[in-house]
Image (cartoon, rainbow, N blue to C red):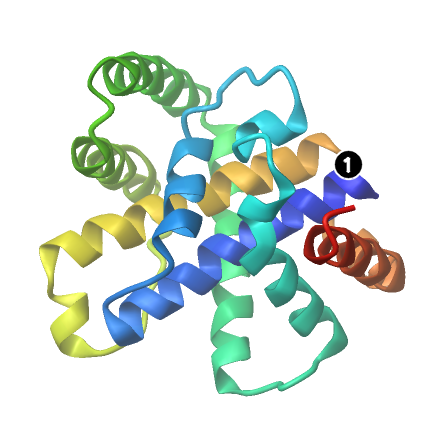
Amino acid sequence: MYSITLSLAGICQSAYLVQKLAYSGKCDNHAFVTCLKSILEINPTSLMKIYGNDEKNLNIGLEILISLLTLSNFSYSYIELIKYILNMIIIENKLKKNSNTLYSLKQKLLIISNKYHTDKNINILTYQLAELYLKNISSLGSRILVKGTKNFLENIAIQEKIRCLLFSGIRSVVLWKQFEGNEFKIIFFRKCIIKKAKIILYNLKNNI
């Protein structure tokens, strides 16, 4: 349940940051970079390597996951979040069935990853991943309609960050399914997932 909980937290964190950018034009930069770098981890040696080898990098995602599953502070914004997450799952399903696109993505991600590890430029990485998403994933025919403030949604830099976050959300969906996660398990093991997420957050806050 640990792996499923963390991968769900990765999905939730990506979706939440999309929403924050769309409505306020800004989001937690550390959480954003964690999501961004997770896309580059094609063949990770461990689950945590995908998220920077530290559970605290998913702190926001864990909190959102608990809120969604416990229905606390439920509002229209939560309905939006759920829609983003469901759309990420739909796109992952389409991507999985398109072997050519999947192969092309992996090859291009290797090139982008090698370049990033050479120059360490986050801005270039954001641009390249956003372009990769636009040309390879959006073209599958399942564009995610993001709602927010018009001025922010029309900003090119914010558009790029949002595409990267949608990309990272899909990456976490892939991870979630690798650990045999599915919609039915969320329903039947909801309490177990909530408990595990709360334990992780408790340990993080108390440095255990």
Label count reads 1
Instruction: Write down the residue under mark 1.
Output: 180
Give the image quarter of residue 136: top left
> Callout 1 environment at 10 Å: few (<14), some (14 to 19), or many (20+)?
few
Q: Residue 135, position in %: x, y?
A: 22, 35
Residue visible at 62% across and 85% down? 74
Q: Residue at x 16, y 77 (%)?
A: 150
Q: Is residue 127 left or right of residue 113?
A: left
Q: Is residue 184 visible in this depiction of the protein?
A: no
Instruction: Tell me the kind of residue under disc 1.
Output: Glu
Can residue 101 be seen by looking at this rendering? yes
Give how far across and how far down residue 113 sits, in percent.
Answer: 32, 18
Residue at 37% over, 42% down = 33
Question: Residue 187 placed where, x, y %?
Answer: 82, 62
Q: Secondary structure at mark 1?
A: loop
Quick one: 154 or 142, which is closer to the camera? 154
Q: Quadrant of the N terminus?
A: top right
Q: Quadrant of residue 151?
A: bottom left
Question: What percent of the width, then of the height, locates residue 121?
Answer: 20, 29
Residue at point 18%, 67% (across, down): 153
Q: In the rendered image of this protein, does residue 43 appear above or below residue 7? A: above
2 relative to 128 in the view: left or right: right
Q: Quadrant of residue 65?
A: bottom right
Asked if residue 146 is positioned above or below residue 58 in the image, the reply reads: below
| Rendered position, 98 above or below 27 | above
Question: Compared with residue 105, is residue 139 higher up or lower down, i.e. above or below?
Answer: below
